[in-house]
């Protein structure tokens, strides 16, 4: 890109890197700090024993548990934010390429640039880099989406189940925090990778305005090759190589979660109403002074 004179938005990308680094540090330290608060007995003895079981609750066990919690959180968030950072890098590169291509095309009455061949080859190399990165990221993306969606549905089920599942308000806060973190990871990863897909196909908007009058055969052939790359297979990151993460993919995922949430809400509402109706029947019987129905004992004839 330097050979073509395309400037790279390094300042913007550095700010994004700094923000992501600060965010990772805050999340890791916050999660570890909450674990330390639990081990100090701030949230009750039961919570403290739950974190150290099956080992005895002593100083050595608490230190070992805190170190393990720190490294476990760091091991989970580091690859996730690494993929987000690389996706932002590819998005910045594609954005700079699109600006360069638009400037080259709109200089002379929206005609095809003279160096359309080198521009097409540069775009092909960028797409090849995204494809190579996707070979390493695709299975991690699939695991993130599969397990986080399942975890989000499970947390929603526990929260909506009511007092029988969540007995304290603090537990509701913890479950809500986990739910927000799950949705946050899914949204951050999918939105950034969908922006890469959108930027990869953005040159189509410029090509549609190109004036093809008095075009040479060589340039027409280069333009057709460029169009076939843009309108062919989707360029971007995938989930296990099956689905390309696009804006449509995000909307489909959101609608699926909305439907699951409504079903869980309706089911728990029906169970709650039936439970209340049963309580009301028992209260009416007790208020009228009638004994509750008991199973009848059959008087069997004695033997002999």
Image (cartoon, helix red, strand yellow):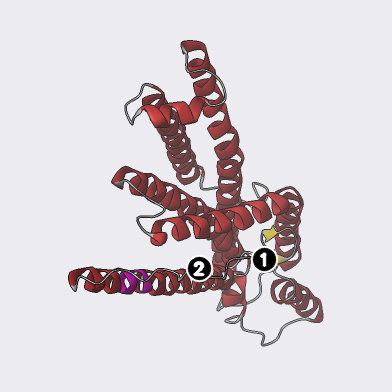
Magenta region: which residues? 274-278
Instruction: Report the mark closest to the observer, 1 or 2.
Output: 2
* Camera-nearest residue between 54 and 200: 54
In the rendered image, is residue 192 in sight? Answer: yes
Q: Position of residue 190 (x, y in %)?
A: 55, 59
Main SS of residues in magenta:
helix
Q: In the displayed orientation, state which residue is furthest to the front.
A: 304
* Camera-nearest residue between 231 and 208: 231
Considering the numbered disc 2 on the image, is that residue within a helix, a strand or a loop? helix
In the rendered image, is residue 115 in sight? Answer: no
Residue under the point 58% across and 44% down: 80
Residue under the point 55% across and 50% down: 88
Label 1, label 2: how far apart the Cα atoms are: 19 Å
Q: In which quarter of the image is the C terminus?
A: bottom right
Q: In the displayed orientation, state which residue is furthest to the bottom.
A: 213
Q: In which quarter of the image is residue 243?
A: bottom right
In this picture, residue 86 sits left or right of residue 235: left
Circle 1 crowding by C-alpha within 10 Å: few under 14, some 14–19, many from 20: many
* Camera-nearest residue between 214 and 206: 206
Q: Quadrant of residue 138?
A: bottom right
Residue underneath mark 1: 244
Q: Position of residue 96 (x, y in %)?
A: 56, 56
Circle 2 crowding by C-alpha within 10 Å: few under 14, some 14–19, many from 20: some
Residue underneath mark 2: 257
Q: Which of marks 1 and 2 is nearer the N terminus?
A: 1
């Amino acid at each position: 890109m330097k050979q073509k004179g395309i400037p790279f938005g390094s300042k913007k990308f550095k700010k994004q890197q700094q923000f992501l680094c600060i965010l990772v540090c805050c999340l890791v330290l916050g999660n570890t700090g909450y674990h330390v608060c639990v081990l100090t007995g701030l949230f009750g003895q039961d919570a403290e024993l739950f974190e150290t079981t099956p080992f005895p609750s002593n100083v050595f066990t608490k230190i070992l548990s805190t170190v393990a919690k720190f490294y476990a959180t760091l091991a989970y968030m580091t690859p996730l934010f690494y993929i987000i950072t690389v996706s932002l890098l590819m998005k910045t590169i594609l954005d700079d390429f699109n600006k360069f291509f638009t400037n080259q095309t709109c200089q002379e009455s929206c005609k095809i640039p003279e160096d359309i061949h080198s521009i097409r080859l540069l775009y092909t190399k960028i797409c090849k880099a995204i494809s190579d990165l996707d070979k390493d990221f695709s299975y991690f993306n699939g695991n993130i989406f599969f397990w986080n969606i399942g975890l989000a549905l499970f947390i929603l089920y526990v929260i909506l189940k009511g007092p029988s599942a969540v007995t304290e308000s603090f537990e509701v806060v913890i479950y809500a925090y986990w739910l927000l973190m799950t949705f946050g990871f899914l949204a951050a990863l999918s939105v950034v990778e969908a922006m890469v897909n959108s930027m990869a196909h953005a040159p189509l908007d410029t090509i549609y305005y190109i004036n093809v009058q008095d075009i040479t055969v060589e340039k027409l052939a280069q333009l057709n090759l460029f169009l076939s790359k843009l309108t062919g297979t989707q360029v971007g990151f995938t989930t296990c190589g099956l689905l390309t993460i696009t804006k449509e993919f995000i909307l489909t995922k959101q609608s699926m979660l909305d439907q699951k949430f409504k079903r869980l809400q309706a089911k728990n509402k029906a169970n709650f109403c039936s439970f209340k109706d049963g309580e009301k029947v028992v209260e009416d019987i007790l208020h009228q002074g009638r004994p509750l129905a008991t199973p009848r004992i059959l008087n069997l004839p004695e033997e002999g």
